[in-house]
Amino acid sequence: MTGERRGQPVHEAEDSEESPRNARAMLRPDGFAERLCRVSLTDLAARGFTAIIVDLDNTLVAYGGTELTEEDAAWIAAAREAGFAVCLVSNNFNDRVLRIGNALGVPAVPNALKPLPRGFEAALRLLGTPRERTVVVGDQLFTDMLGAKLLGLHCILTEPLVAKDWLGTRVLRMLERVVLGRRPAA
């Protein structure tokens, strides 16, 4: 069964009349999904997206891990088969990020320094797609979502795969709970 068939429509964030430049709007994901493999490829295609930027740690693989779940690997393969351009973007170091990207047959941008735009811009160049047709999927509000919003990219926040995180990320997770007012449930 492909990720596309298993995928569910992303729960959209509530509409806001806030200016996109407003700090609160910059920290508001456009949608939520329990996991990467729960993001509906059919829904993304219907909305006109042609490219997907995927975070690595705790979105695609467990923090510090290299093993993908069968479901998430199938989702990446289904995305590619459906015609989506896919790129990994990670703040992690070269070898691991590039090795996972190569195993999936997708380009990868390591050392991205998210939320700074540099890594996302590099991914857009690799994908060859415009911002309005590219969606970012990640598990962190202050890196993945904020970085996407700084470039005007649509973004979907997922639950982290595992509770284990780098110390700095654990601090940011506490702030996420305050900003979101809850954990992003699917």
Image: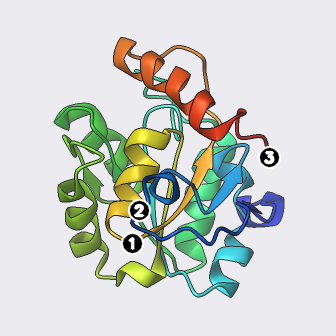
Horizontal and vertical percent position of residue 118: 17, 57
Q: Residues within 10 Å of mark 3 (few under 14, many from 20)?
A: some
Horizontal and vertical percent position of residue 119: 22, 55
- The residue under the point 39% across, 60% down is 148
- Left or right: residue 32 compared with residue 101: right
Circle 3 residue? 186
Above/below status of 158 relative to 95: below
- The residue under the point 81% across, 61% down is 8
In depth, the one of 128 and 160 nearer the eye is: 160
Which amino acid type corresponds to the residue marked 1 in the rendered image? Answer: Gly
Above/below status of 179 relative to 112: above
Q: Earlier in the sequence, mark 2 or mark 3?
A: 2
Which amino acid type corresponds to the residue marked 2 in the rendered image? Answer: Lys
Circle 1 residue? 152
In depth, the one of 118 and 7 nearer the eye is: 118
Q: Can residue 87 be seen in this view?
A: no
Q: Can residue 141 be seen in this view?
A: yes
